[in-house]
Image: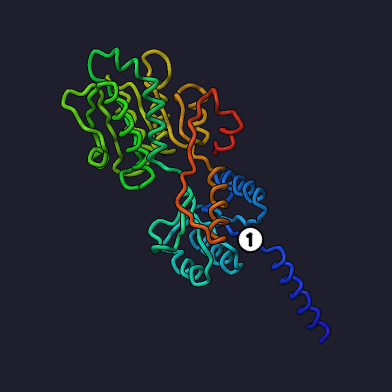
């Protein structure tokens, strides 16, 4: 009997300790070990400290571990936090858990890719990169670098876009943001633009096309998402005599640019070289930027994303209105990539 009482006492102490140290807010990410998610955690913890709240940040071992993330989400709900931050690996997998959180009155804030396709009203707001604006930022930097070459060219010049696919919202938005901004800047300088390549990017772009175009924007999408096929697309673009710039709209496509350039050696910032711009970071892309193969690249801002997620959760828990937030992006080059504000957002 004494032994049973002792066990019960220990269990009560454990439960009491767990309750005492329960976090105010639970955040369930798509991963944990990856540097990107550690950067999100950094921003979340900084904002939590600033606001005087506590957070518990978790994530599965990898971004295919749907069941593991579901277990973490259920544990978060059972902890009865004031709000939950969620970047779902699979919305469908999480639907029952989301309904459970709603029934218990726990607000959910999405972040990163959020919870696409969740029931209306289930996710109060999302903190994420505005991918269209990020693509436009890349276009502004590229256009600035090639503006004089466009003016000096006797005929038309070509700008290539390497896109992983024509399906993913983030990839397509980054491509269209780039294409539309190039079109806008070209029109302001009195140049006509023509679009070639993948039909999705042609049809969804806002560019008013001209028959006598000074600038051709060609977007290539592989038939399957493989590194080999994307590298071939980049080789084909780099081998065109009129090409002056090439943009890869995510890590996959930017790395394919580097692979394609290994034998061709056409990318660079020197006279007559093709200006290259990437998206995301990672060791391959960072090396390309540092070594001058790329003019620069766009990185998301995971530290700011983590901070904004906590800010939105606290507001939602307090009954304040919340709305989707663009957590921004940054253009990094060999000159600024070691600056602390940039470096904290560069992930491998």
Q: Tell me: residue 309, above or below residue 138.
A: below
Could you say whether the residue bearing mark 1 is in a helix, strand or loop?
loop
Task: Tell me the crowding category of disc 1: few under 14, some 14 to 19, or many 20 or more residues within 10 angstroms, Cα based.
Answer: some
Quarter of the image where the N terminus is located: bottom right
Which percent across, then down, holds residue 111? 49, 51
Which percent across, then down, holds residue 128? 47, 47
Q: Tell me: residue 209, above or below residue 36.
A: above
Direction from residue 131 to residue 306 in the image, left or right: right
Which percent across, then down, holds residue 189? 29, 21
**Residue 130 in which image quadrant:** top left
Which residue corresponds to mark 1?
24
Give the camera-side residue of 127 and 14: 127
Which percent across, then down, holds residue 284? 49, 32
Direction from residue 210 to residue 56 in the image, left or right: right
Q: Which residue occupies the extreme left position in the image?
A: 211
Give the camera-side residue of 286 and 76: 76
Q: Which residue is located at x 36 percent, y 14 percent?
A: 272
Q: Which residue occupies the extreme bottom position in the image?
A: 1
**Residue 200 in which image quadrant:** top left
Q: Which residue occupies the extreme front position in the image?
A: 320
Q: Which residue is located at x 73 percent, y 71 percent?
A: 16
Give the camera-side residue of 81 and 311: 311
Direction from residue 184 to residue 31 in the image, left or right: right
């Amino acid at each position: 009997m004494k032994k049973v009482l002792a066990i019960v006492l220990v269990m009560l102490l454990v439960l009491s300790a767990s309750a005492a140290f329960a976090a105010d807010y639970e955040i369930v990410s798509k991963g944990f070990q990856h540097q990107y998610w550690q950067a999100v955690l950094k921003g979340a913890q900084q904002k939590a400290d600033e606001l005087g709240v506590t957070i518990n940040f978790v994530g599965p071992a990898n971004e295919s571990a749907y069941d593991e993330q579901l277990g973490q989400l259920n544990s978060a709900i059972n902890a009865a936090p004031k709000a939950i931050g969620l970047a779902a690996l699979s919305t469908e997998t999480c639907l029952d858990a989301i309904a459970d959180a709603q029934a218990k009155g726990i607000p959910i804030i999405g972040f990163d890719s959020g919870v696409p396709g969740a029931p209306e009203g289930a996710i109060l707001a999302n903190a994420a990169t505005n991918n269209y604006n990020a693509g436009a930022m890349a276009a502004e930097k590229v256009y600035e670098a090639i503006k004089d070459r466009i003016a000096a060219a006797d005929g038309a010049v070509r700008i290539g876009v390497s896109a992983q696919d024509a399906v993913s919202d983030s990839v397509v938005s980054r491509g269209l943001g780039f294409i539309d901004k190039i079109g806008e800047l070209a029109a302001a300088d009195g140049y006509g633009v023509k679009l070639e390549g993948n039909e999705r990017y042609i049809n969804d772009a806002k560019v008013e096309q001209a028959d006598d175009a000074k600038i051709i924007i060609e977007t290539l999408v592989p038939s399957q998402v493989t590194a080999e096929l994307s590298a071939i697309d980049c080789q084909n673009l780099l081998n065109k005599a009129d090409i002056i710039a090439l943009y890869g709209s995510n890590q996959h496509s930017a790395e394919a640019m580097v692979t394609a350039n290994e034998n061709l050696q056409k990318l660079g910032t020197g006279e007559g070289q093709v200006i290259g711009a990437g998206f995301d970071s990672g060791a391959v892309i960072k090396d390309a930027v540092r070594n001058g193969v790329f003019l620069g690249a766009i990185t998301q801002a995971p530290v700011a994303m983590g901070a904004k997620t906590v800010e939105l959760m606290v507001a939602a828990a307090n009954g304040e209105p919340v709305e989707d937030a663009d957590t921004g992006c940054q253009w990094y080059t060999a000159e600024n990539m070691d600056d602390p504000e940039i470096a904290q957002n560069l992930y491998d």
